Image (spheres, rainbow, N blue to C red):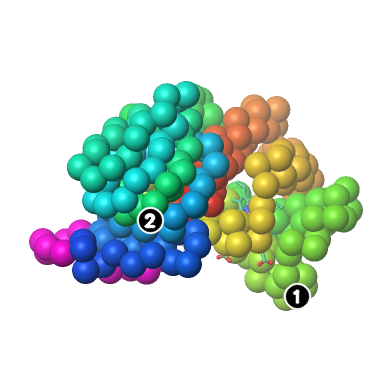
């Protein structure tokens, strides 16, 4: 992945023909410009490259510049050739095959209404626990890792265990959980944090099915550390809140795996 121009603050123009270069096999993509809501990239696929069926949580537009290929979109095959424009609605399953070297511009754009709905009660309760989470954060996350590694020792292989021992990883997680508690009513404010963590998760091969394991360990740790303050209402609110955050990561990580930026 090469970044040609990463700020959307200034206008610019670019001759795409000069940027097109094909790898020997696979995909070369270049980010032309991006901001919090959209990303414009040039994709160059070597002849024979296949992208397996996947979905994106963002709307996507393909504009073909040169070459030939087939886009399977929601079960229909669309012939890609120069000048073809395709709009793919968020969550539409799609797959791609390059019959020749194929270059296109891909635009990914956020749907503003895609912010998950969290009940007001949950938002209020989780926000009210933010000071406690701040105060006891590291104790909670240290306990969480203890519980998780005891119940699922196999997960340790994915972690840098020296960062566990010196407390860096529990401290980072504690900060993330506290930020979430503080900004649960404005998830946009968490975007850069989600980006950093999601990229780290993709690098360390975190899988969607591991989220319930982390969730159960975190909830148990919150209960252990907060004691009486962890009432049934608090636990129910954090259960709902965790699921929403987990889904945000799962969606973003799936996207990064398929459209790395
Ligand atoms: C909502 C749930 C989660 C939150 C808030 C979270 C938070 C974090 C944070 C803050 C980091 C540090 C990122 C950095 O280096 O800057 C991280 C890294 C990491 N997370 Fe998560 N995470 C979550 C779920 C998971 C799950 C389900 C797994 C699966 C096992 C996982 C495994 C990892 C691993 C392996 C790392 C890299 C640690 C290392 O380099 O040793 N996380 N996570």
Quadrant where the N terminus lies? bottom left
Label 1 to label 2, Cα distance in Å?
45 Å
Mark yes or no: residue 38 visible. no
Give the foreground label among 1 and 2. Answer: 2
**Label 2 sits on residue:** 101
Quarter of the view holding residue 78: top left
In the image, farthest residue toward the front: 100
Q: Quadrant of ligand 1?
A: bottom right
**Label 1 sits on residue:** 162
Task: Look at the image and give the residue range highlighted in magenta.
Answer: 1-15
Helix, strand or loop for disc 2: loop
Rendered residue at 32%/40% (across/down): 80
Picture coordinates of residue 171, whole percent (x, y) = 63, 65
Left or right position of 34 against 260: left
Above/below status of 21 relative to 90: below
Closer to the camera in the image, 84 or 137: 84
CB at disc 1 and ligand 1 closer than 8 Å: no
Closer to the camera in the image, 201 or 187: 201
Picture coordinates of residue 234, whole percent (x, y) = 64, 33
Picture coordinates of residue 76, whole percent (x, y) = 42, 24
Q: Residues within 10 Å of mark 1 (few under 14, many from 20)?
A: few
Rendered residue at 39%/51% (across/down): 100
């Amino acid at each position: 992945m090469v970044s040609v121009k990463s700020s959307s603050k200034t206008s610019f123009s670019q001759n795409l023909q000069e940027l097109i270069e094909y790898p020997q096999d696979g995909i070369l993509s270049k980010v032309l410009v991006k901001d919090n809501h959209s990303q414009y990239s040039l994709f160059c696929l070597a002849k024979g490259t296949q992208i397996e069926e996947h979905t994106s949580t963002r709307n996507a537009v393909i504009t073909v510049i040169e070459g030939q290929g087939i886009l399977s979109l929601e079960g229909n095959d669309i012939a890609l050739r120069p000048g073809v424009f395709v709009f793919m609605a968020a969550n539409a399953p799609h797959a791609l095959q390059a019959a020749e070297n194929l270059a296109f511009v891909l635009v990914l754009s956020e749907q503003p209404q895609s912010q998950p709905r969290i009940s007001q009660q949950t938002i209020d309760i989780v926000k009210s626990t933010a000071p406690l989470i701040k105060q006891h954060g590291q104790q909670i996350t240290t306990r969480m890792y203890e519980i998780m590694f005891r119940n699922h020792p196999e997960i340790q292989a994915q972690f840098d265990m020296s960062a566990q021992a010196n407390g860096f990883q529990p401290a980072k997680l504690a900060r993330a959980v506290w930020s979430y508690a503080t900004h649960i009513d404005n998830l946009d404010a968490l975007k850069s944090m989600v980006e950093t963590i999601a990229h780290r998760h993709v690098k360390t091969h975190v899988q969607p099915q591991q989220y319930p394991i982390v969730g159960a360990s975190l909830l148990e740790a919150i209960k252990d550390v907060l004691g009486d303050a962890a009432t049934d209402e608090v636990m129910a609110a954090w259960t709902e809140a965790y699921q929403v955050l987990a889904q945000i990561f799962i969606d973003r990580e799936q996207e990064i795996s398929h459209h790395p930026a």
